[in-house]
Amino acid sequence: MIVCLVLGAAGGYAAFRFLPSYSSTAHDEARAAAVSANDALAAARKDLDEARSIQQSDRAQLEALQATIARQAADLDAMTERLAAVSSQARSPEDQSSVVEALSRERDRLTGENESLKRDLAALQTERDAGKQSTTVAEARLEAELARLRDEVVPELTAERDRLNRKTLMMLADQTNLKAQAKAAADARAEDAKRIAELKTRLADAEGELTASQEVLDALKLESRAGQESESVTDSNAAKAATQPDAVEKPALDTRKPDAVAQALRTAPGLETLSQADLQRLTDTLIAGECVTTALKSVFDRVPILTLRNLIRDLNSDC
């Protein structure tokens, strides 16, 4: 019973000691209580062992004294019988007196030793009684300490262990939730970064289209001014022609190099949807020196801005 309680208390303390130190104060207090209980239990067991050892030693001494007293009592009885025998023998008064005197001295010595041994025996019996009382006190202390361990310390350590186990499980659950939240936040940041990169790309494309549109607009403005000037010149020439007998022939368009036109068409965007016939017609029109805008209008219902910009730039065209 005692060994089971001690092992139970030590096991509870060990289980508590190796829990994660999430509550250092409670851990220290419980550990101090367990150490104090173990110390008190060890002291009680030591006192009990000492008392039992003393009791066994006293019992051995008491038995030895009792044996000695019994032996001396037997010697006294023998001495008395010898005195009686001497008294009954027919001897001279002097011999009988010396023998009696010697036997009397021996009897007195044995009697003194017997009385001394009786006193020692009484003292040992007193010490034995005190030892029994000390053993009883030690046993009572041990039982009280074991009862305190069983009824107070072990339940407290068990409750504290269970509380810390629950707290540990809760903290592990919180840690799992925090990891999941951190992963979700990281995924959201990665998605936002991807979205930002896409928006930057779209913004760059929009800026490029805006620049191209501005260039096309500028080119169209130039073309419009050139057309107005051309119309003015045409009207002026027509007026002059009306007064002149022979009209002046319209100058021919400046042709372009086929290689330059082919290179510009290869790098220009937006031409993938054209059929082979439309692409050939566009090529022939540009080689013939036709305006880029006019050439594109011949193959597209709506002129693509980026295609117009690139061809105007690459062919160094003014329209």
Image (tube, rainbow, N blue to C red):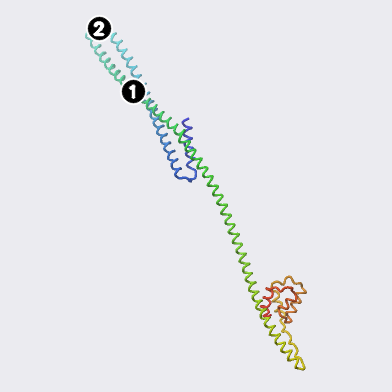
Mark 1 neighbour density, 10 Å: few (under 14) some (14–19) many (20 or more): few
Kindly identify which residue carries mark 1: 126
Q: Label 1: state its secondary structure.
A: helix
Q: In the current view of this chain or complex, which residue is farthest to the left?
A: 94
Please give the label number shown on residue 190. Answer: none
Tag 2: residue type? Arg
Residue at (49, 38) in percent of width and height: 159
Q: Quadrant of residue 296?
A: bottom right
Q: Nearer the viewer, residue 316 or 229?
A: 229
Residue 77 location, x and y as percent?
32, 12
Q: Nearer the viewer, residue 214 or 317?
A: 214
Q: Earlier in the sequence, mark 1 or mark 2?
A: 2
Kindly identify which residue carries mark 2: 91
Residue 319 location, x and y as percent?
69, 80
Say left or right for 207 vs 81. Answer: right
Tag 1: residue type? Thr
Residue at (59, 57) in percent of width and height: 188
Seen in the picture, residue 181 relative to 29 is either above or below; the reply is below
Residue 144 location, x and y as percent?
42, 30
Mark 2 neighbour density, 10 Å: few (under 14) some (14–19) many (20 or more): few
Residue 117 location, x and y as percent?
31, 20
Q: Nearer the viewer, mark 1 or mark 2?
A: 1
Residue at (34, 20) in percent of width and height: 65
CA gap, disc 1 to disc 2?
A: 49 Å
Q: Label 2: state its secondary structure.
A: loop
Seen in the picture, residue 202 relative to 183 is either above or below; the reply is below
Q: Quadrant of residue 280?
A: bottom right
Q: Nearer the viewer, residue 231 or 101?
A: 231
